[in-house]
Amino acid sequence: MPSECLTTQCRLLVLDVDIHGAIRRKGKVGVYKVKWWSLNGENARKLSEKIKREGKWKLDGDADRIWEEMADCIRRSAREVLGVAKEGSR
């Protein structure tokens, strides 16, 4: 191309990087999680029955609202049947 410059358009970049060890995450205070790992046999049957009994499974209205109601019912039932553990506990 007659109007193109013949010199390179790339330039060398030099960078000093200093990485200090791994970043540790602080535990969340007051946060609890459901013990989903205990969902087996008898607990699975209890949870299933509780969700069927307490669930509001009406399929009318806004899809987002229906989804939230169903998810809240499942979470609430799981907390009662399976229990909760403090975040970060082993």
Image (cartoon, rainbow, N blue to C red):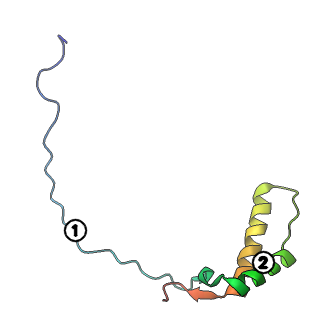
Of labels 1 and 2, the one closer to you: 2
| Depicted 87 relative to depicted 23: above or below | below
Asked if residue 41 lies left or right of residue 5, the reply is right
Q: Secondary structure at mark 2?
A: helix
Q: Dot 2, how many residues are within 10 Å of its Cα: few (below 14), some (14-19), or many (20+)?
A: some
**What residue do we see at 15% from left, 46% from top?**
13
Q: Amino acid at mark 2?
A: Ser
Q: Is residue 2 left or right of residue 48?
A: left
Identified at 18% across, 13% down, the residue is 3
Q: Residue 80 location in percent, x, y?
A: 73, 86
From the top left corner, tell me how far across and down residue 28 is, in percent.
Answer: 50, 81
Residue for badge 1: 19
> What is the distance, in whole Å, between disc 1 and disc 2 at their CAs?
49 Å
Q: Which residue ends up furthest to the front in the rendered image?
A: 41
Instruction: Tell me the tag on residue 48.
Output: 2
Residue at 13% across / 42% down in the picture?
12
Left or right of 10 in this view: 39 = right
Classify mark 1: helix, strand or loop: loop
Along the line of sight, which residue is nearer the eye, 30 or 60? 60
Query: Which quadrant holds residue 41?
Result: bottom right
For residue 30, above or below residue 7 = below
Say which of 81 and 5 sits in front: 81
Sequence-earlier tag: 1 or 2: 1
Q: How far from the left and from the top, in percent, is residue 85?
A: 58, 88
Q: Which residue is nearer to you in this view: 57 or 43?
A: 43
